[in-house]
Amino acid sequence: MADEMDEIISDFLIETTELIEELSQKFVELETNRDNQALVNDIFRSVHTIKGASGFLGFTQMVQLTHITESVLKKIKDGDIFLAPNIMDVILESIDMVKVLLEHIKQKDDVEEDLTGILGKLQDVYDGAGTSAEGGKSTKQASAKSAISARGEHEELHPDIDTEDLQSNFAGEYEDNDYREVDEAKPPKHLGELLVEDGKVSEDDVEEALTIQSMIKESIDTGDVPKVGEILTATDKASKEDVKKVLAKQPAQSDKGQPQQVEQTIRVDVERLDNVLNLVGELVLARNRLMKLVANLDIKYSETADISHLSELTAFINLITTDLQLAVMKTRMQPVKKVFNKFPRMVRDLARTMKKEVELRLVGEETELDKSIIEEVGDPLVHLIRNAADHGIELPDVRESAGKTRHGTVILSAYQEGNNIVLAIEDDGKGIDVDKLKEKIVEKEFASQDEIDRMSDKEVLDYIFLPGFSTAKLVTDVSGRGVGMDVVKTNITKLNGSISIETEVGQGTRFLLRLPLTLAIIQALMVGVADEVFAVPLSSVVETVRLDKKDIKTIRGQETVFLRDEVVPVYRLANKFYITSTSADDTEKVYMVVIVVNEKKFGMMVDKLYGQEEVVIKSIEGFSNSADGIAGATITGDGKVVLIIDPTVIFSSTLQGHK
Amino acid sequence: MYDKNMKILVVDDFSTMRRIVKNILKQLGFDKIEEAEDGEQAFTKLKSGGFDFLVTDWNMPNVSGLELLKRVRSDAKLKSMPVLMVTAEAEKEQVVEAVKAGVNNYVIKPFTADVLKEKIDKIFEKLKK
């Protein structure tokens, strides 16, 4: 029983956290689109749901908080409160408190938060509206629910109505009451309006019916007020058929604009998925070996019928394995919406503290990425978006005098490009002034004036990503403390991704993050140095060339090669790993793998090229990998353990070496 | 009084709530319980037959509990299905609406196993009469 309870609570935590995440975004959306009734209903229902479940699970503080929040939302929903920014602030604060309470529930620390502050604020919002909203229904509710004190509401009305009596009174009438709202004076379209539209009754008739209704409302105590439709038919203004016909339209209309559809999903522990992925990884390795063996057999005994059958079967297994692998990958894919969701709220808060007007637009939220990448990409994005809002977008007055709109726009988009997912953060702010950046680089002694003069704009911009480099003139609360961009870059490269900048002064800046679809299985180029085999991620390989040794020229102590009008520095992989290369002395021709790291080309000299293979990355435990240029290991088709090299690390160290 | 083997459909959009309600029903000795996450899904399940009792939440997206109740009552096969409505609203108008639409009884969240048992007892007592 205790276990069952624990499971329910952990379910509650997961589900509620998801709801809260969605809520934050919906609120921001609501602020720009206050008339979206479906959205308000949605938000109301979410808070309502959290309250309901919390009640069962005995989370008293949560019930207290959500109860009054719900009451406030109800008033917003009913149009009794106008959703001004300051009211929104209070509601968002209460949602933040819900998160804090959730964290306590998660930690099981039994800590009670001091809710008086936020409850007081909510109560003020709630009371502030009470004065403007007179009329039978709302006053009755206000007194019945005087918010906080109504925590014990379930005791208030003990359901001892004689159901049979009521039922026989209204027998056969339920099909006439196909609408939800009792109060006919609320949006969306009402029965009266619809009947007028259809020309069935006149506006005056509806007026009259509404007056009758409100009279009845005042005179009786229960909420049992006849519907406008009932009054209209009773006073012979409209026929029962007409009312029915119009009513049939009504629910359909209110159903429109429902923000989301319920998905058919089951919840699976991530550990199980990881396990499946691991097994598929093993299968891929075994398949690779099998294919190699069969290929060998095929050469030796090509005439044997059994062997040709075996080949066919292997080809089939190969196909299925590839499909299976893709299918398993898909189970780990999640829409980037999961990370994007928190940004509208963040940008809104930022804009308010910085007195700027910033609109965040999200594009391609449905684009999917591997779960582990989604988890890692959040922090870098937070940083880039903050930067865009803080340094990129100018103050409204500045923008106006520059001939731009007062409000700046930040666009966060995601799309697929081949085997990569691209995340772009684009602002229409002031852009980065490359000349100023150059001054700064020299001033901070990151490079000499001479070096700077020879650099392309792209290379200059790359300095932003060096540790300890910040372009912010003022250190603000938000960003510009000189930490960050280097961390962003490190995080992205850790994910086998890359980051680049495009900017134009006065027009804005765009950061592009290129990320792989998945981390676990990659396409690799197998290369050899002496007897050692290494795997190079294909994503960073541009081409392979075979060149004459004499084409390699040494410029300023650096071996380089002239490759199609481009000077490419050459490194010997053998030297990196202290191996004696076989091609070091006795051959004329050598192989070079051209690798691109951060849009810079490098040549990597190797002895042999074996070809392309799909490799499963296994991390090497007990080693602080990647620091030494090794991303992990894999097992090849012929059963050898092979190291996967990490070009970004290898070449970034050489980059700094010649700085 | 009632058959512990009867098949019950629990409808709520919040899976935690479904589990809680299921749990309480299990405490009362029921174990043929199925779930649906909104009125639409619930109605499809009910139509496929075999259910003896419906426990539904009120406030759900797409097809609400009330809507579901109305559909059940206007369906030739399902119209006599006993329905218990779960609601957090202690508001009379809602209850009256549900009663008008033909709900057999309703229970207000949060409730205990005893309260639920009392409600179920009442429903099936009345049905016997």
Image: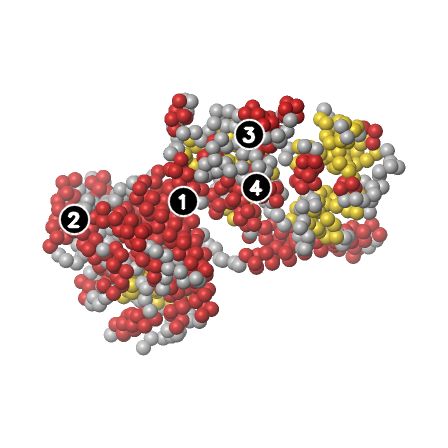
Discs 2 and 3 lie in a common subunit: yes
The residue that label 4 is drawn on is: A487
| Mark closest to the chain's N terminus, 2 or 4 | 2
Mark 4, residues whose alpha carbon is within 10 Å: few (<14), some, or many (≥20)?
A: some
On the image, which quarter does residue B99 sit in? bottom left
Callout 3, which amino acid? Glu
| Residue A180 disc label | none
Callout 4, which amino acid? Val
The residue that label 1 is drawn on is: A25
Chain for numbered disc 2: A
SS assignment at label 2: loop
For the C terminus of chain A, the quadrant is top right
Alpha-carbon distance for marks 4 and 1? Answer: 27 Å
Residue drawn at (40%, 22%) of the image: A401
SS assignment at label 4: helix
* Percent coordinates x, y for residue A482 in the rendering: 54, 37
Discs 3 and 1 lie in a common subunit: yes
The residue that label 2 is drawn on is: A135
* Percent coordinates x, y for residue A251 in the rendering: 30, 49
Chain for numbered disc 4: A
Residue drawn at (22%, 68%) of the image: A160
Discs 2 and 4 lie in a common subunit: yes
Residue drawn at (56%, 50%) of the image: A372
Q: Extreme bottom residue here? A: B1
